[in-house]
Every structure is written in C-alpha cells, then in structure tokens.
Amino acid sequence: MKNLFILFLVFTVGCGNINQKYDKIEPEQVKQLIVEFLYAGNQSDFAELKRLTTSDFLIYSNDGEMNFNELVEFIQDWPEPDKFNFNEFDFEIETDCNSAFVNYHYGPTDINSENTQIDLHSAYIKRVGNELKINFLHSNTMEK
C-alpha cells in the first residue's frame, strides 16, 4: 500500500500526471510572450492582449490594481505608442513545467537616455491547456 501511495504522488506532483507530461517551459518562450504582450499593448491590439492573458488577469502597481478592462481603458488614454524595442529589455526568467516568473525593466535600454524613470515589472505566467498566458503583472516605477 505504501508503494502504491508513493506511485500516486509521483504521478500527481511535479510536471506530469497520468494523462499528460509537460517539459520545462523554455525561457525564450516566456520572453517571447512578454514581448508579444508589450507590442500588442503598444499597438492597442486588444484582441491579441486578451489572447495572451488569463481570464482573471490583473496588474498590480503603485497606483493600485487593474483588471483587463481597466488596462484597455488605460491604453486607450495613452497619448502615443512607446518607442522602445521590447526585445532589448533585460529579462530574468525562472521556469518550471507549468509556470514561469519573469522580471524585466520597462523603459529605455540606452543608459544615456534623458528618461530618468524606469518601470520594474514582474509577471507570473501559467500554462493554460497547451498555451502560456500572463496571469498577473506587477509594475513598480523607480528612478534610474
């Protein structure tokens, strides 16, 4: 009975179960998801933003909490698209088979930029079916 219980734990805990086994999420997949999210927001592509986020997506920031609809309103009120190359941001990524955690700085990658503020973002990404989706994002504005 003890061996049966251990076998049950092996199949229910970790990266696999009886029905499906997932490999560890590749950091490049996580980076690509974040970059796609940033480009979609920058271009006001709300259908793409919806596709890239979970149904309970939230953003936490210095100003409080924002759900998906409030994010759309925020983007619509933004004066113009940002001119950043999101692929150049520095990413720190940790992954397992079902989720990922990423930190990145949102802002100019040129240290000589006149912009003195930069946003430190953290995002939690989870596997939903066979897709990766952003579940929540934390944004904290700071001085360079």
Image: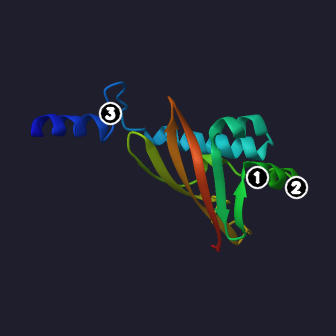
User: Residue beneath label 3, please?
Assistant: 16
Residue 100 image point, x, y percent: 46, 47
Q: Is residue 6 above or below residue 89?
A: above
Inspect the image, locate mark 2, and give the three-letter code of the amino acid beneath it: Asp
Q: Which mark is residue 48?
A: none
Tell me which numbered mark, 2 or 1, is placed earlier along the sequence: 1
- CA separation in Å, label 3 and label 1: 34 Å
Say if residue 36 shows up in the picture. yes
Observer-side mark, 3 or 2, equals 3
Q: Residues within 10 Å of mark 2 (few under 14, many from 20)?
A: few
> Which residue is more in the foreground, 81 or 88?
81
Q: Residues within 10 Å of mark 1 (few under 14, many from 20)?
A: some
At mark 2, the secondary structure is helix
Say if residue 91 shows up in the picture. no
Residue 125 image point, x, y percent: 52, 46
Inspect the image, locate mark 3, and give the three-letter code of the amino acid beneath it: Gly
> Which residue is more in the foreground, 27 or 65?
65
Residue 124 image point, x, y percent: 53, 51
**For the point 23% across and 35% down, which residue is it?**
8
| Quadrant the N terminus occupies | top left
- CA separation in Å, label 3 and label 2: 44 Å
| Quadrant the C terminus occupies | bottom right
Q: Residues within 10 Å of mark 3 (few under 14, many from 20)?
A: some
At mark 3, the secondary structure is loop
Residue at the far top: name it.
Answer: 19
User: Residue beneath label 2, please?
Assistant: 77
> Which residue is more in the foreground, 132 or 9?
9
Query: Residue 9 lies in what quarter of the image?
Result: top left
User: Residue beneath label 1, please?
Assistant: 71
